[in-house]
Amino acid sequence: MDTLNLLMDGFASALTPINLLFAFAGVVLGTAVGVLPGIGPAMAVALLLPVTFGMETSSALIMFAGIYYGGMYGGSTTSILLNTPGESATVITAIEGHKMAKAGRASQALATAAIGSFVAGTIGTALLVTVTPIVVKFAVSLGAPSYFAIMVLSLVTVTAVLGSSKIRGFASLGLGLAIGLIGMDPVSGQKRLTFGFAPLVDGIDIVVVAVAVFAIGEALWIAAHLRLTPTRTIPVGTPWMGKEDWKRSWKPWLRGTAFGFPFGALPAGGAEVPTFLSYVTEKKLSKHPEEFGHGAIEGVAGPEAANNASAAGTLTPMLALGLPTNATAAVMLAFLTMKGIQPGPFLFENEPDLVWALIASLFIGNTLLLLINLPLAPLWARLLKIPRPYLYAGILFFATLGAFSVNMQVADLWILLLIGLLGFALRRFGLPVLPLILGVIIGPMAEEQLRKTFQLSAGSVSGIWSEPLAVGIYVLIAILLILPILISFIRRSRGIQSDLVETVLGEEQEPAKHQTELTNEKEQRVGKDES
């Protein structure tokens, strides 16, 4: 009952005219950046961080949440009309969605994506209301050793599943942790990694890091691969669905939601795995499996629902534990830190009005997104015709202006350029960006918990595993890291054994084959002599 009362108070705050305006602006902007390939919600939120300095914290968070949800909606438009996923989470949508568009069913594909996103987002937010207070009660009882272990688990799991290899993922994480260490030691007051450069004594502002990695790095990467050929989009009318489309879509929406929310709430979740699982499930359960690969509506409905449900799930560890599981949540967490708000389980106690206004705004933003996306789909398609040079020139301008406005220091522009080049290098060599951002944000928090652990144990290393939960988490981390190596080793050894068996069998068969040939020749000679 207390949760319901708090949610009602959150609606009272979120439904004020100013917050409604920011929610509307967020969903419109989020849909727009989701439609444009290469510009995700993380970049949009990072660019807006400097603008939100003078805003109310609740209004800014409501706008960021609208951008986050809107980006998930808009990404499906690009995938369906252009066969170019705006984010990795919408790759599966492109498989069937673009085939539907080429077959003249773009309006039905866009409609099932939009309505499925609304259904999944609403159910996911309701689950967020139910699950998050339970997680908070559990998290409040944790000590510093367990909290440090959870942070290590978050860093390791997210790093291990992203990128083309674990080595590249951990290399990106190491860079992020190194950037997070720059500045003054919080306990001893010693300067760390400043290289005698005075502006680095206070550390590098997370706003500058986020804008540099997402905006500058992405703009440089797109510029390096820019093609001036005009983009061809498939024309689309107002999205609509027939009776048969509704019949084939509602079950995939629910199943996709069931896949998406739990994976979004996991430390290494994300939307890629549940969207893939949803697609495979719909292919197996469909009464029309022959349509898959040629434009099956279930292949759009299920993955899109999983995508948006995972977005709601992502906010669970961010709000309850202060741990982001994707790039947009990481930037939103950086905003809270920038505002002097300590993220984590005590956020619900210290800032209940802020948290419940944000959660209530998710219901409002979902409704606004459905009302906006269905009639305005043709308008979003026109955004794809904006020339890329103009688009990314504007991004670079606002990124530079935003980074300079943080501290009004020219040094921040040099730092912006250097970290932007680092972001370009990450993309060039296939290193994932998210571990770097998580290292910058969670690294100092993990260091704080580690220092508390050592203080409680009088400097003994055994304090790290002094709580049962911490021991269990470290065992889980060891399994996650060692198990794939063991599986690979077993497969490799089995492959070697099978090659040896084939070789031995081949050598054993050679004498027998030779003896058979001699016997055949002898029989032929006897036959000739008798004749």
Image (tube, grey):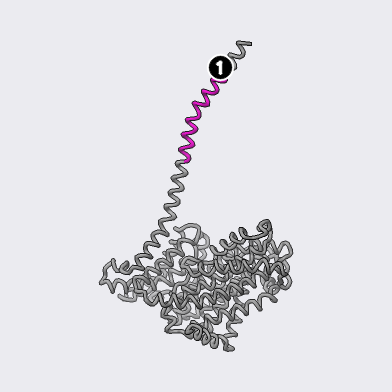
Q: Quadrant of the C terminus?
A: top right
Q: Is residue 285 left or right of residue 496?
A: right
Taking the spot 37% from the left edge, 62% from the top edge, the residue there is 475
- Percent across and percent down for residue 272 are 55, 64
Identify the residue under disc 1. Answer: 522
Residue 500 in magenta stretch:
yes
- Neighbour class for label 1 at 10 Å: few (<14), some, many (≥20)? few
**Dominant secondary-structure state across the stretch colored magenta:** helix
Residue 136 in magenta stretch:
no
Note whether residue 94 is visible: yes
Note whether residue 194 is visible: no
Q: Is residue 319 left or right of residue 35?
A: left
- Percent across and percent down for residue 184 are 35, 75
Q: Quadrant of residue 286?
A: bottom right
Judged from this view, the residue extending furthest toward the left is 458
Which of 94/55 is in front? 94
Which of 228/37 is in front? 37
Instruction: Name the kind of residue labelled 1 in the image.
Output: Lys
Q: Is residue 522 left or right of residue 105?
A: left
Q: Quadrant of residue 477?
A: bottom left
Q: Is residue 81 left or right of residue 176?
A: right
- Percent across and percent down for residue 362 are 56, 79
Number of dots carrying numbers: 1
Span colored in magenta: 498-521
Circle 1 SS class = helix
- Percent across and percent down for residue 370 are 64, 76
Asked if 175 appears above or below 490 in the picture, the reply is below
